[in-house]
């Protein structure tokens, strides 16, 4: 269990709605991290998927008069289409209605039952028939009553299955205290520890079932067929079921990876809303109770939320949900990917601002910075023909440009490895700025007109240096804007050789005699109609 290949998973998305910008962000973040690790020569397994069971799905399907299976298939297609559109390249797909998953969930439940970790108990409480849920005092209004939104509320008693979570709280506190890399960023780890210390273990057991009279759209409890398991034993288990846990002897063993090779996961990428209690409390305790040793606990990478421009949480009712498919249509997948990575600090929240996406990310940095740089020299380099790698001109400006690239590469690698993609982007932007300043200072269009051999030698050096910078940019940008990076390499007529890693990136990738291709705009102008 040595965390060998880089195994990354993301929270699986609920299929009770359409994908929104928060979903897109999480998947792009995971994809950028995965692509970077591949570029580091690491073996990556990136798992993502959809959370398809539950009350909300059952209700939405009933409202449409369709089977829940039909309903989730339709919603799942929207997620699959979006990942395709955004260039999200994953290795495993976790759909919780898949038999491979049902198999693991049922075995896990049976195992915990055999170990005495599950028990059945009756719960008495106020139940809202309209909302199909038990209500607590939190749902009472100021006058102590349940409001009309709950419909008819009556006191009922219901039996359910419970997981002995409370028994393991002390272990979890100890585990988190002694593993400072379990939760990233650090401040979230402290929040979790503080919350755990407030928990009364005697009150902490977790209800994990629903009787079938209330919920049929779920995974049946194997030792009590009148019940289905509810939410977390179904959803969280995806991380191991699609990584090959308990696949031995099944018909699908060959389709899944080798669990021993993968587990434990280097990073579960999740939003802050599902850190506590689900991922930081239930999940490690579920694994611990099932017999996973401490060294087999996965690590959590917790990202913040995209809110709307005013900092308000995005919600359908506020009418401020941004459709990522539409944005990718307008700005290209790369435009959206770039904005989602450059305007948020991993772990923190950010406000989604379409003006910044258009003006700063797309127009200024992508089109005006990277696109313009390529445009300023590629045409000239193509007309001039063979590049000269060893032009004798080497001024201080040329050296400064080389140094900008040499400094950016390790900074970029370090930030990417630390999940700080926005800082890695800053490192790249510094190279672009340096290169554009170099063009301004060297004025290749003036040199091009001169017949003086000194100027001609200088021009060879300038065109070579700019080509080399652009090769480096096309590699560094590959995880973030893969399509534009590949197009740039196409225009340079340079491909990353098979097995190429970031260790191989150095000054002098292009040999003397190399001929670049035709320059084409990488980021076409975007016109947005004013409403
Ligand atoms: N199905 C559960 C997760 C089960 S994990 C075993 C779920 N689904 S979700 O569709 O509501 O959210 C999926 C992911 O998207 C979560 O990590 C969540 O934090 C993230 N985001 C949802 N809205 C978001 C933003 N506005 N911004 C950033 N990420 C957000 O929770």
Image (tube, rainbow, N blue to C red):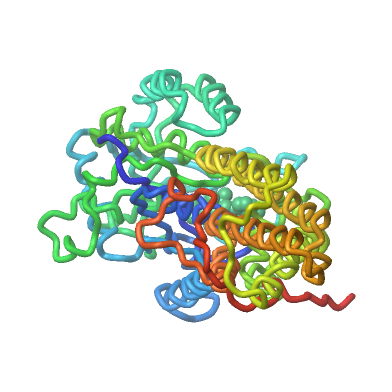
In the rendered image, the residue lying farthest to the bottom is 65
Regarding residue 316, the answer to whether it shows in the image is no
Q: Nearer the viewer, residue 419 or 498?
A: 498
Q: Is residue 331 left or right of residue 152?
A: right
177 to 279, vertically: above or below: above
Residue 22, image x and y in percent?
Answer: 62, 56
Which residue is painted at 56% across and 22% down in the image? 194
Question: Which residue occupies the foreground of this view, 104 or 383?
Answer: 383
Placement of 403 over or under 488, stated as above or below: above
Query: Of residues 523 and 209, which is closer to you in this image?
Result: 523
- Name the spot of residue 140 as percent of width and height, x first: 68, 43
The quadrant of the picture occupied by the N terminus is: top left
The answer to which of 477 and 349 lies nearer the viewer is 477
- Residue 258 visible: yes
Left-right relation of 244 to 298: left
Task: Point out the residue furthest to the right here.
Answer: 530
Image coordinates of residue 15 in percent, x first then y, are 50, 65
Residue placed at 26% from the left, 65% from the top? 99
| Residue depicted at x 31% and y 27% | 294
Left or right of 150 in this view: 179:
left
* Coordinates of residue 284 in the picture (x, y in percent): 37, 34
Numbered label tally:
0
Please say if 319 is above or below 231.
Answer: below
């Amino acid at each position: 269990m040595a965390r060998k290949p880089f195994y990354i998973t993301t929270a699986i998305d609920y299929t009770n709605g359409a994908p929104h910008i928060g979903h897109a962000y999480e998947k792009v973040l995971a994809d950028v991290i995965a692509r970077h690790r591949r570029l580091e020569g690491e073996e990556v397994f990136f798992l993502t998927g959809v959370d398809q069971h539950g009350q909300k799905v059952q209700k939405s399907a009933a409202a449409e008069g369709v089977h829940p299976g039909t309903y989730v298939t339709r919603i799942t297609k929207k997620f699959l289409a979006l990942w395709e559109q955004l260039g999200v390249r994953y290795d495993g797909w976790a759909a919780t209605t898949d038999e491979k998953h049902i198999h693991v969930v049922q075995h896990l439940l049976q195992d915990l039952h055999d170990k005495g970790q599950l028990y059945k108990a009756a719960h008495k409480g106020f139940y809202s028939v309209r909302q199909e849920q038990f209500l607590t005092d939190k749902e009472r209004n100021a006058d102590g009553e349940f409001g009309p939104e709950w419909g008819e509320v009556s006191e009922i008693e219901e039996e359910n299955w419970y997981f002995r979570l409370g028994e393991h709280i002390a272990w979890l506190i100890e585990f988190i205290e002694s593993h400072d890399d379990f939760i990233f960023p650090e401040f979230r780890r402290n929040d979790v520890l503080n919350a755990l210390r407030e928990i009364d273990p005697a009150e902490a057991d977790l209800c994990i079932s629903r009787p079938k009279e209330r919920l049929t759209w779920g995974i049946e409890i194997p030792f009590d067929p009148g019940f289905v398991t509810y939410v977390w034993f179904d959803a969280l288990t995806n991380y191991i079921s699609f990584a090959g846990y308990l696949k031995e002897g099944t018909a699908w063993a060959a389709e899944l990876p080798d669990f021993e090779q993968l587990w434990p996961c280097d990073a579960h990428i999740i939003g802050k809303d599902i850190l506590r209690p689900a991922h930081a409390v239930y999940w490690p305790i579920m694994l611990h109770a099932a017999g996973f040793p401490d060294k087999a606990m996965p690590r959590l990478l917790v990202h913040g939320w995209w809110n709307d421009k005013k900092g308000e949480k995005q919600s359908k009712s506020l009418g401020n949900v941004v459709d990522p498919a539409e944005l990718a249509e307008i700005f290209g997948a790369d435009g959206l990917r770039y904005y989602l990575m450059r305007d948020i600090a991993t772990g923190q929240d950010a406000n989604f601002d379409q003006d910044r996406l258009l003006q700063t990310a797309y127009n200024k940095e992508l089109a005006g910075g990277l696109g313009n740089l390529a445009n300023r020299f590629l045409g000239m380099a193509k007309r001039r023909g063979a590049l000269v790698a060893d032009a004798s001109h080497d001024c201080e400006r040329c050296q400064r440009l080389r140094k900008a690239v040499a400094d950016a590469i390790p900074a970029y690698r370090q930030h990417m490895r630390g999940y700080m993609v926005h800082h890695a982007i800053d490192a790249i932007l510094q190279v672009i700025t340096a290169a554009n300043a170099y063009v301004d200072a060297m004025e290749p269009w003036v040199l091009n007109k001169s017949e003086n051999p000194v100027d001609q030698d200088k021009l060879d050096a300038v065109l070579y240096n700019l080509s080399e910078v652009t090769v480096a940019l096309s590699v560094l940008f590959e995880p973030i804007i893969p399509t534009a990076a590949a197009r740039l390499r196409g225009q340079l007529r340079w491909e990353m050789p098979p097995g190429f890693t970031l260790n191989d990136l150095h000054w002098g990738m292009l040999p003397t005699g190399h001929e670049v291709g035709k320059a084409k705009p990488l980021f076409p102008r975007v016109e947005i109609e004013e409403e």
